[in-house]
Amino acid sequence: MRRAVPTQAVLWAALASCLSGCKVDKETFYGKLFSCNPNAADPACGNDIDGQPMSCVAAYQLGGRNFCATACDRATSENGDESVCLAAGAETAGAQSGARLKSCRPD
């Protein structure tokens, strides 16, 4: 004589197998470029992998596509060999007045 498997047990087993196989690779997700609209009230950039706010870089002015980058304060940020704080908003926007980009100095 066969016993019936309780429906609830089957559902829990299915749920457990689905949850264990679904993982987000943060490095891959945050390594992508996300587009934005610099003219919108909320350009929809969100935060970077470290939870820092991001700003919209208006690359369309140079013939490119707009993208999100980690925000910086143009008034207090120092540019170095590794990165530069590029204007990406009003100077009065404080921590989101610029966007931190890797610098490139071809010799």
Image (cartoon, rainbow, N blue to C red):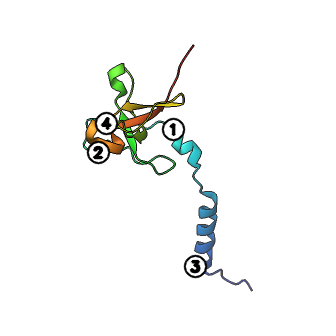
Q: Quick check: 60 above or below 14? A: above
User: Which residue is label 2 attached to?
Assistant: 42
Of all residues, the one furthest to the top in this rendering is 107
Q: Quadrant of the N terminus?
A: bottom right
**Mark 1 to mark 3: distance in Å?**
40 Å
Q: Secondary structure at mark 3?
A: helix
In the image, what residue type sits under mark 2?
Answer: Asp
Percent across and percent down for residue 92 are: 26, 40
Indicate which disc, 4 or 3, sits on the residue closer to the N terminus: 3
Whether residue 77 sits left or right of residue 7 in the image: it is left
In the image, what residue type sits under mark 1?
Answer: Lys
**Mark 2 to mark 4: distance in Å?**
8 Å
Q: Secondary structure at mark 2?
A: loop
User: Which residue is label 4 attached to?
Assistant: 37
Crowding around mark 1 (Cα neighbors within 10 Å: few <14, some 14 to 19, many 20+) is few
In the image, what residue type sits under mark 4?
Answer: Asn
The front one of 42 and 80 is 80
Indicate which disc, 1 or 3, sits on the residue closer to the N terminus: 3
